[in-house]
Image (cartoon, rainbow, N blue to C red):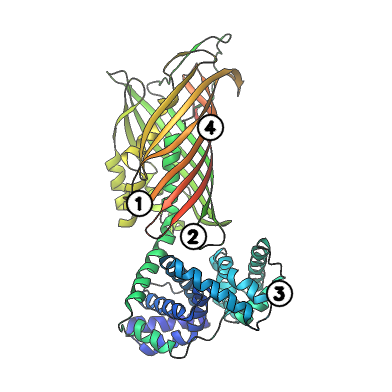
Amino acid sequence: MPELDDIALLRQYAEDNSESAFATLAEKHVNLVYSTAWRSAGNAQAAEEITQAVFIILARKARSLPRRTILSGWLYQTARLTAANYLRAEIRRQKREQEAYMQSLLNEPEPEVWPQIAPLLDAAMAGLGEKDRNAIVLRFFENKSLGEVGAALGASESAAKMRVNRALEKLRKFFTKRSVVLSAATIAGAISSNSVHAAPVGLVITVTATAAKGSAAAASTLTLVKGALKLMAWTKMKTAAFTGAVVLLTAGTATIAVKEIKEHRAPVGDRPVEMKIKWTVGKEYPMHIEMDQTATTDVPGRPQPVTQGVNLTQDFDFSALKELDNGGWELELKFDSETLNVSQGGRNVMSFASAQSPAQDAGNPAAPILRAMIGTRIQYFTDANGGVEKLEGVDELRNRIAANSQPQERALFNELFSEDTLKQYGSFAAAMPNRTVAVGDGWRVKKDLSSSIGVLTLDMEYTFKNWEQHDGRRCAHVEEKGNILTKNISTANGMAVEITNGEVSGDFWYDPAPGMIVDVDNHQNMTLKITTRAQTMTSQVSRKIRLALLAGQ
């Protein structure tokens, strides 16, 4: 199988420092890498520099690449990420060069189809899954037969044909949405004929000298290599970081819901009610959260915004251990289970379920954190109004994570699940007036929340709308609306995230018999301004949350 030969050559270079083995690989794949870089950068000089950087990265990772790696697919993806890093660093120059490149395409005697899809091809390829992208690279970039594609992917020829056809259909839909209407066969022919061009004479020699032999490379090339390596690492970690932020904001802005199974005697008439959370010593309160979130982010240099979806479910128990002398409570939190699914551009990029085998966690940077949390117990000590004064057990949780994760993952946990963040899990009384209220009464709650992105200000208004039957119980229906904004920005994690517009709305239902909120429907819409060292992005986030607690079992 050709692709296994690639890995054998790479192993020969890694183990024997064989320059000839690396030169063979470079000669075989340099056209693919150079063409990918040239499409993105728009000029030969930049494409050559990006190509050198890609092969330097290959040389550095020669020992660590898995044996089943499809090397051409890996090189294509690395070239795309390296080119993206190059463009971010020199975005002004890139714009001028891209305009010149587009004009030159229009003036060349090429087929009419290629100039339409060339500027969009790499963005379309980025939206494919790894197997689909590898299939397209092998079939049309390298003109492999379907039998060879199947052998490289570990599949039959018919299965390879089906995968190639599905991937082509995805590309066709991508182009159609951007007003480039072509058949899948036409797209296949255009990619096969035009996607890979001959690299400049001598580039193989230069690549081999700088990457395999360790010869001196230009400072700009080394900078590009470092930036691309960081980008590749960030590509793996960004989902976990974003998910952690989701958990933080969900805990910080949503009201915990409690859903009783037992029937309770309803209050008579629309009389006033003391609206206050009332714990029962010795009782367990198992909670369930469901959250769906969508985010659309405008990224400079990309023709289309990046879309991301997050679905999170989490189960955890609170137990009321005892009432304290100050009128507050000692509570205990235990994490029971969690599922998480993250999609980007319409395709799944990460899944986690605590019930599945840990063997399925491979390649998921968030898994060690999420799995270590299951079974952890944390004690909460509140004041008379339900405000959390201190926690115990956080150090034990950190130790569990340290024993099952790498330094990067431990740093991620410390950023996203600080003690201030975990306090929000126990902030049940945040929405309560803690006094007697009548229908039509309203109250305001304004508080600051510490988070990994800085200090946030939550400003909410609540109105006791009416008494109503809800899930077989007569409940006080409360309407909530307000906003959440950034008060102070933190750049401790290498970027600045500011909530420039955050709206929160929804309803909750309070049953006075158990002294608990029995249901919550919460909606959040936010505009985030995300600033890194290289660029500023704007993200529109929409989130729906349902929370419930099944007690009395």
Identify which residue is drawn at 37% across, 53% down.
495
Residue 354 visible in image = no
**Amino acid residing under circle 1:** Leu
* Residue where numbered disc 4 is placed: 505
* Residue where numbered disc 1 is placed: 412
**Amino acid residing under circle 3:** Ala
Q: Which of marks 2 and 3 is nearer the N terminus?
A: 3
Closer to the camera: disc 4 or disc 3? 4
Q: Earlier in the sequence, mark 3 or mark 1?
A: 3
Q: Separation of disc 4 and disc 3 at Cα? A: 49 Å
* Residue where numbered disc 3 is placed: 185
Q: Separation of disc 2 and disc 4 at Cα? A: 31 Å
Residue 49 location, x and y as percent?
A: 41, 78
Q: Do the residues labelled 2 and 4 touch (CB within 8 Å)?
A: no
From the viewer's side, name the closer residue of 531 and 193. 531
* Residue where numbered disc 2 is placed: 300
Secondary structure beneath dot 4 equals strand
Q: Separation of disc 3 and disc 1 at Cα? A: 45 Å
**Amino acid residing under circle 4:** Ser
Is 164 drawn above or below residue 469 in the view shown?
Answer: below
Q: Earlier in the sequence, mark 2 or mark 1?
A: 2
Q: Which of marks 2 and 4 is nearer the N terminus?
A: 2
Residue 136 location, x and y as percent?
A: 59, 73
Closer to the camera: disc 4 or disc 1? 4
Secondary structure beneath dot 2 equals loop
Q: Do the residues labelled 2 and 1 touch (CB within 8 Å)?
A: no
Res. 248 image quadrant? top left
Res. 284 image quadrant? top left
